[in-house]
Amino acid sequence: MTKIVIIGSGFGGLTAVKTLRRQGHQGTITLISPRPILFYYPSLIWIPAGLRTEADLTIPLNGFFKDHNVQYHQANVTGLDPIQKQIQTDNGTIDFDSLIIASGSRFIRKLPGIDDVCIPCEGYEPVKKYTDDLAKLNSGTLAFGFASNPKEPIAMRGGPIFEFLFGMDTLLRKQKRRDKFKLVFFSPAPEPGKRLGEKAVKALLSEMKKHQITTYLGNKMKGFSTGMVHTEAEDIASDLTMFMPGMTGPAWLSNSGLPLSEGGFIKADLHCQVVGFKNIYAVGDCGNHPGPQWLPKQAHMADLQAETAAKNLLANQKGLETNSKFNPELICIVDTLNQGMLIYRSPKHTIMSPKMKIFNWAKRFFEWHYLRSYR
């Protein structure tokens, strides 16, 4: 029986499991990840307001693995031999016939002082620490920013920073202490959020101006120090800084024998097939896939690519043509704690809604709907 292995228990990895089973695969599926959980990163934005806890966002997967007949292997991947079809981990070597890599990415931590700022999408702990530090402040300046991978500008995740920024404005107003704080947004990009579309950039910057958020745009980052954000043009005072650096591939890819892009991601095609390897697929943030310049690195895209990879993997096993392709699609709700702005983009359409309360509720409903199959 063909042995299918999946690396990663995030959005892409779990969608691949569900798709393989829906497509009728009855054989063994082995999944490798450091912990048997799904952590729901999109809802980290609600931690500072006390609307979510770590337990709310941490979904144990033992039941899911049992229901889908998945053999779980708890380990960190350390390398890969694509010719011998072996995965090296810190808990032994795993053989495979077909492989789906959905291991996510990592943030580039090269800027001086970056260890002292909050990188929110690294998990619960950084956001909880930020929340606790904020509670100790009676006044001050709060800075929010993001950057990209200079070798692969598409490798960024700016959406959550917009949400934390606008959410903080809402939270401080609810606490009746917004007048005690200065909010600052910085980015080396002159048009931050451009992948969302020209209208979205204008709308986001207009919202910042409306809510008295100071912007510093278009200046290359130099680093951070106590109470300061450093750019090539100027230094920005900050009592608390939240920053999302650019992204690159997992460190173990340097020991994988797979083709990598200049930015450090696995080169894959529209079928999610790794270039040069018919039996290996890459989905989500770990991959460098063809597509428009706005191709997002977000959970929705990982899900779409995982479905594509699983279908093509099974077709390849049966000797059929691997003709399934993923559709480039960006969809997000920029949440502000009490309202939200819907943004949708495809090769044919770009849609942006005005800020409305219904989209805040829609984001909450989607969280419940998405996670119920794993709980």
Image (cartoon, rainbow, N blue to C red):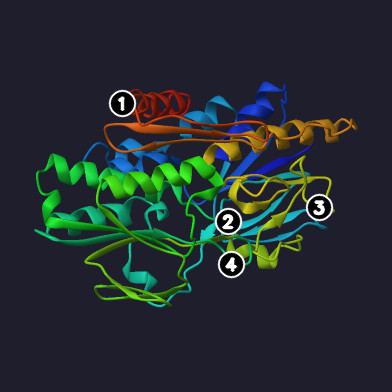
Check disc 1 and report its element: helix, strand or loop. Answer: helix
Label 2 to label 1: alpha-carbon separation: 30 Å
For the C terminus, the quadrant is top left
**In front of the other: label 2 or label 1?**
1
Check disc 4 and report its element: helix, strand or loop. Answer: loop
Label 2 to label 3: alpha-carbon separation: 19 Å
Identified by mark 4, the residue type is: Pro
Location of mark 3 (residue): 275
**In front of the other: label 1 or label 3?**
1
Label 1 to label 3: alpha-carbon separation: 44 Å
Q: Where is residue 1 in the image (x, y as percent from the top left)?
A: 79, 34
Q: Nearer the viewer, residue 230 or 318?
A: 230
Identified by mark 1, the residue type is: Lys
Label 4 to label 3: alpha-carbon separation: 23 Å
Q: Are marks 2 and 1 in contact (CB under 8 Å)?
A: no
Who comes first in sequence, dot 2 or dot 1? 2
Specify the label residue 357 is tagged with. 1
Check disc 2 and report its element: helix, strand or loop. Answer: loop
Q: In this view, does 151 lie above or below 367?
A: below
Q: Position of residue 245 (x, y in %)?
A: 46, 62
Location of mark 4 (residue): 150
* Callout 1 crowding tier (Cα within 10 Å): few <14, some 14–19, many ≥20: some
Who comes first in sequence, dot 4 or dot 3? 4
**In front of the other: label 4 or label 3?**
4
Identified by mark 3, the residue type is: Val
Label 1 to label 4: alpha-carbon separation: 36 Å
Residue 273 lies in what quarter of the image?
top right
